[in-house]
Image: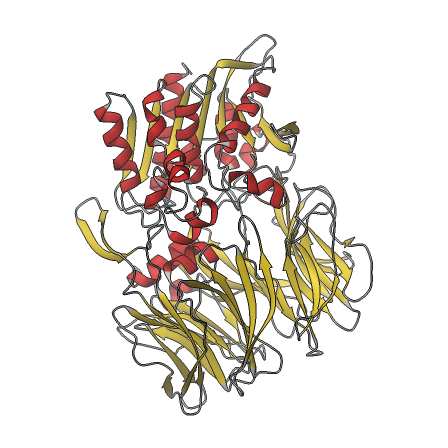
Amino acid sequence: MLASLTFSLPLLLNSTGIAAKPLTLERIFDDPSLAGKAPVKLKFSPDGKRVTYLQGKVDDYNRYDLWEYNLKDKSNRLLVDSAALFSGPETLSNEEKARRERQRVFGRGILEYKWSTDGKALLFPLNGDLYHYQVSTGKSKKLTNTEAFETDARFSPKGNYVSFIREQNLYALELASGKEIALSTDGGGVIKNGMAEFVAQEEMSRMTGYWWAGDESKVAFTRIDESPVEEAIRNEIYADEVKLFNQRYPFTGTNNVKIALGVVNINDQQVDWVDLGKDQDIYLARAKWLKDNKTLSYQWQNRSQQALELRFYDSKTKKQSVALTERSDTWVNLHFDLRFLNDKKHFIWASERDGYKHLYLYRTNGQLVRQITQGEWIVDSIKGIDEQKGLVYFAGRADTPLEQHLYSVSIFKDSNAKRVTQLGSYHKVVVAKDAQTFIDNSSAVNKPNSVALRKVNGEFITWLEQNPLNKNHPLTPYLSDLAEPEYGTIKAQDGQTLHYRIFKPANMKKGKKHPVMVNVYGGPHAQRVTNSWRSKNLYFQYMAQRGYVIFQLDNRGSYNRGKAFEAPIYKHLGEVEVADQIKGVEFLRTLDYVDSTRIGIYGHSYGGYMALMAMFKAGDYFQAGVSGAPVTDWALYDTHYTERYLGHPKTNAVGYEQSAVFPFADNLNGPLMVYHGMADDNVLFTHATKLFKQLQDNAKPFEMMTYPGSKHSLRGKKVQTHLHQTITNFFNRHFDM
């Protein structure tokens, strides 16, 4: 999936009487983080007695340690200091580097962790090895100490084993004896066992390739054969060297991996292979065991992504059935909202069949019982289930598409969804296993990320991390100059509602005209106009303080508005998205403080593509543009993402041609800058160089900035500082600021 450019600095705001210091780019990216204390990856312990989380160090916000909030004594404490275990430069395998890039994870130290089911231990990787933390002793033990790298580690369901991937094979380590069991042995080269292939990680958000049965008797796993995938030589250009990789990259229209699904017995390592059908050109989107521990569910998706089948495989009888099928004239969106109930008779499933993502109750024989939620709004995800009370808790947007809230609704009876969290904030929640309490991580566009513990009726229990602003908080000196954005709506050409957001400049005076930076993403599965804090806002605040109007609009094709809002981009990208952004500029031209001759556009990834298409197709509306890591030719992007929206190149050749930037590039008239990471393994650097060549051949002037060693997200304090200096200087020069 294409990614927007972000940097992890949650903002805390409050009114103070302290005079503001000028916000600088250098300070935005410097230590200590302007976020103050910003916990991430919050989890309940299985016994519900503590909440664990990761937090960056005060003197290096990119190095994370493992912390807990103890609910009994109401105190935060450091559990594991990552530097005490390993303080040198971390060495990672190429596979792990790629996996972190797919996860959009950046940093050092402890970046992920898992609880054992009994709540007695924690597991985390560090510098390529695995560590086991015993809660009772407060000590960490190194489980592996090999030259190889162990990845995708987790406890087995009962906590007797730790499983992981090493050298493309699946292993289980018996904790009591220390014995390692190889659950696969033929991994290596083009064969990968228990691992997710590139498009599964990047486009399906499936970061694993193995799944434990609840009784620990067996493990389902994927075996992928990459030999059908086209091998391309990809270069990564660093400051002092060029690395060449023979990467098997599934360009759209070409072969994907060949995938097999097996079930391996823990006792004898015998494998039964699941019959996936005659059609081998398919995707395995998800897998999950039913509560009976003998039935494996898996989601089979056809190549066009217009059909998705939920299949049940009986590991004892080897028989299969199709529990349900989803179909679409455009594409079927994937999700993780499949929950099997403890009664072993029902499951809950999410579907967009009525135009919006909602929850449905099924019997395990595939019979539909009822639709649980409904309305012209979407369910984001299932957060918890209380079977005793017959309630399902979910994140959704029943009140407004701009805020995510926690709701409850009856599973078996007709009822309206009941909102638990308060309007006026955006809530990311974690519901406890017993569905009696939840972690509420709430924010608003200019409100702190605060983390509270609440009862499932919304009642406040305690702060887990209030992150209070005081005279010692690093953000306090900058508070009084931060702008409050305005929200509004306009209509698209087909009458659908488009939401926008404006950050007004700090030095507004009657009669004064200001330049505009239109910040755009515009692609599928993304939403920018929300009432939530996003770290990029710090840069927009910086630009607003220097006299710019910042404008954001979620065009058709973006997310969280239902299928009718997404679908207009099908078979032709860069058309309705640009038309909607033009509508936004037409609105901007009606504002008396906007200089319509100085409207620029800036975006990264799909937003970079949008910036190019806007400059090439709508030069009368956009006078300057900055395009970051853009897709320029969809034939150079991967199968699962590209074919989802454009179909197969053989059946939609015209759509591919007209969705590329090249047919329109000769229309460029205004100033353009393109930047790209020279080690990008997602949107390959070739996208940029191909555009550079055409613009040069046609004598079209442009500017470019390349970043040696940087991948798609251009991580790192120094890179981010320089990048935003470059963007700022570009607009300042061309808009006479």
Q: Position of residue 662 (x, y in %)?
A: 33, 31
Identify the image quadrant of residue 506: top right
Name the residue rendered at 62%, 79% in the picture.
Answer: 291
The number of callouts visible is 0
Colouring chosen for the image of the structure? secondary structure
Q: Which quadrant, please, contains the C terminus?
A: top left
Identify the image quadrant of residue 407: bottom right
Location of residue 338 with respect to 630 vertically, above or below: below
Q: Position of residue 521 (x, y in %)?
A: 48, 37
Identify the image quadrant of residue 201: bottom left
Left or right of 633, for residue 545? right
Q: Position of residue 588 (x, y in %)?
A: 57, 19
Name the residue rendered at 47%, 45% in the picture.
Answer: 645
Name the residue rendered at 29%, 76% in the picture.
Answer: 146
Q: Nearer the viewer, residue 607 or 556?
A: 556
Location of residue 24 with respect to 207 vertically, above or below: above
Location of residue 330 with respect to 620 vertically, above or below: below
Q: Position of residue 183 (x, y in %)?
A: 38, 82
Q: Nearer the viewer, residue 403 or 480?
A: 403
Outermost residue toward the top in this view: 511
The answer to whether residue 666 of the structure is visible from this angle is: yes
The answer to whether residue 429 of the structure is visible from this angle is: no
Left or right of 724, for residue 313? right
